[in-house]
Image (spheres, rainbow, N blue to C red):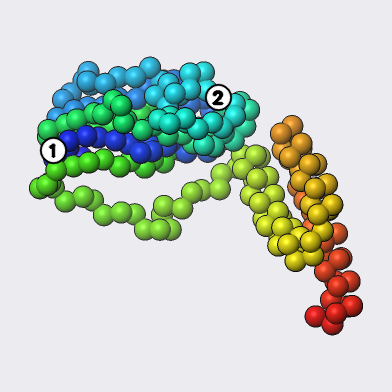
């Protein structure tokens, strides 16, 4: 990106990884005002710049760094994080280029996406056109956690709609407890089965209600 920026603030800068390879050794590098190697800023790994050395196994949110998505307890599946350069702004006069290695020395092929915001003075060169909405949609991937999570979300949405309609609190409590335990234990098969069982029971209740009320 070219031009003069009073402050550069990626808010957030979020790799959205969707495969099963270790991503932590990819260094962050920020090149200021057209400089070549070595850059002014050269980090020690992807997880460190987002405030999480050795990678967290649960989500957390800090004021300037955080992991708002951790797909699994290890590094498998989708991971998304953020970094606010508020107390340590990065300024540039001519240009800035922010890069992130995919593994050590780009030895991996992880699929990343990112979003960044910054302050920039006028005038500046035109920005490139944004990709279409369809092109920006996240890919499903083949990770078991992602597939189970999507199916569970679909079933939960249907279940909660029915629960709100029927006000069946005991069913909601039972399904939620079993589901949360299964997802925590990475027992995706059981999690989906519990959701389907709850939805099936709710369908029966809805049918019985329709027979009684004629609706």
Please name whichever residue, 95 or 61, is drawn nearer the observer in this view of the structure.
61
Q: Residue at x 43, y 21 (%)?
A: 48
Q: Residue at x 18, y 42 (%)?
A: 120
- Residue at mark 1: 4
Question: Can residue 109 be seen?
Answer: no
Residue 16 drawn at (x, y percent): 47, 38
Compared with residue 129, is residue 31 higher up or lower down, i.e. above or below? above
Q: Residue at x 69, y 49 (%)?
A: 152
Please name whichever residue, 204 or 148, is drawn nearer the observer in this view of the structure.
204
Residue 55 drawn at (x, y percent): 52, 23
Q: Which one is earlier in the sequence, the residue at label 1 or at label 2?
A: 1
Question: Can residue 63 be seen?
Answer: yes
State which quarter of the image contains the C terminus.
bottom right
The quarter of the displayed image where residue 121 is located: top left
Q: Residues within 10 Å of mark 2 (few under 14, many from 20)?
A: some
State which quarter of the image contains the N terminus.
top left
Label disc, if present, on residue 56 of the rendered structure: 2
Q: Residue at x 48, y 18 (%)?
A: 53
Marks 1 & 2, CB-CB < 8 Å contact:
no
Compared with residue 215, is residue 54 higher up or lower down, i.e. above or below? above
Q: Secondary structure at mark 2?
A: loop
């Amino acid at each position: 990106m070219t031009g003069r920026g009073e402050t550069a603030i990626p808010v957030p800068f979020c790799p959205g990884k969707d495969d099963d390879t270790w991503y932590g050794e990819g260094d962050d590098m920020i090149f200021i005002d057209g400089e070549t190697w070595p850059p002014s800023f050269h980090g020690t790994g992807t997880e460190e710049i987002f405030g999480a050395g050795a990678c967290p196994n649960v989500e957390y949110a800090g004021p300037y760094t955080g992991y708002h998505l951790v797909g699994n307890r290890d590094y498998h599946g989708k991971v998304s994080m953020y970094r606010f350069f508020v107390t340590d702004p990065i300024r540039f006069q001519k240009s800035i280029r922010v890069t992130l290695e995919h593994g050590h020395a780009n030895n991996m092929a992880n699929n990343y996406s990112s979003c960044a915001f910054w302050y920039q003075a006028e005038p500046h060169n035109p920005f490139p056109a944004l990709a279409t909405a369809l092109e920006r949609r996240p890919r499903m991937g083949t990770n078991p956690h992602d597939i189970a999570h999507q199916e569970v979300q679909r079933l939960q949405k249907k279940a909660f709609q029915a629960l709100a309609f029927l006000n069946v609190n005991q069913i909601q409590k039972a399904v939620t407890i079993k589901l949360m335990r299964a997802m925590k234990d990475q027992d995706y098969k059981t999690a989906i089965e519990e959701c389907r069982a709850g939805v099936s029971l709710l369908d029966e209740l809805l049918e019985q209600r329709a027979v009684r009320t004629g609706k």
